[in-house]
Amino acid sequence: MSNVENEKKIQPLTIAGFQTLIAEMYSDKDAARGIDGTFMWLIEAVGELAGALRQGSREELAAEFADGLAWLVTIANVAGIDLEQAVRDKYGSGCPGCGQMVCRCDLGEKP
Amino acid sequence: MSNVENEKKIQPLTIAGFQTLIAEMYSDKDAARGIDGTFMWLIEAVGELAGALRQGSREELAAEFADGLAWLVTIANVAGIDLEQAVRDKYGSGCPGCGQMVCRCDLGEKP
């Protein structure tokens, strides 16, 4: 399959679709690593993201963001969490703090 | 607008759609915090995710995953990175290591 066909296959890319893509790509490895081992990869990716934010090219930065999301959905796969449903539940009806679609919480408050 | 209507509005939830949702919800605060300040919130969310993976309920765990993704896309917003395009570029044509849609890299290798 050509790259173009592969890209078409995953457009539009939903959060659930990306979680499934990563599950299909890495599920055997992820099961072998478990949550703890996989979490270390997430932390490494977050560290590399910090580095790219400091001094990476736009391309390197984009790739580190992609890795961060890939490891987050990987852990969600191992933990059996539907990430798209999780964000819909928490953010789909507005800011969890003030309930507004455009947040009106004070700046110092979470989130 | 009712919660149900809000939820409908963002279905299906693409990565780009969620990034836009978070931008609309928090862009003023995000600009004020900047990348460094926002990155600290991501790290806090990742720490809370670790805690929920150890001893959280399913509901708490799902909420921590949602927060992790929310902070990741928030930083992408501040940095001007299109996260959906970034993951498509890196993972849309297969594993970045071996190029296969089902990864055949050795277990110890990245990713």
Image (tube, coloured by chain):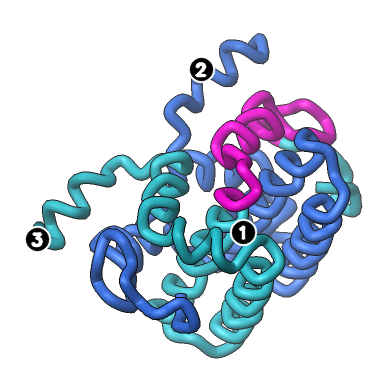
Chain colours: A blue, B cyan
How far apart in space, not on screen, are marks 2 and 1 (Cα)?
A: 23 Å
Q: Amino acid at mark 3?
A: Ser
Q: Earlier in the sequence, mark 2 or mark 1?
A: 2
Which residues, given as a range, are shown in magenta? Answer: B76-102
Q: Closer to us: mark 2 or mark 3?
A: 3
How packed mark 3 is, by other alpha carbons closer than 10 Å (few <14, some 14-19, many 20 or more), is few
Q: Residues within 10 Å of mark 1 (few under 14, many from 20)?
A: many
Let me know if residue A18 appears in the view: yes
Report the Cα–Cα distance between label 3 and label 1. Answer: 30 Å
- In the rendered image, residue B111, in percent from the top left (x then y), is placed at 80, 47
Picture residue at 77% right of the left edge, 67% below the top: A43
Name the residue tied to disc 2.
A8
Disc 3 is placed on an element classified as loop
Amino acid type for the residue under numbered disc 2: Lys
> What residue sits right under mark 3 in the picture?
B2
Residue lying at 68% horizontally and 48% vertically, measured from the top left: A65
Q: Which residue is mark 1?
A: A72
Residue A24: where, in percent of width, then height? Answer: 59, 40
Question: Furthest residue to the bottom?
Answer: B55
Q: Chain of mark 2?
A: A
User: In the displayed structure, does residue A63 sit left or right of residue A8?
Assistant: right
Residue at 67% in and 34% down: B91
Chain hosting mark 1? A
| Same-chain check, marks 2 and 1 | yes
**Is circle 3 on the same chain as circle 1?**
no
A18 or A47, which is in the foreground?
A47
Mark 2–mark 3 distance (CA, rounded to whole Å):
34 Å
Kind of element beneath mark 1? helix
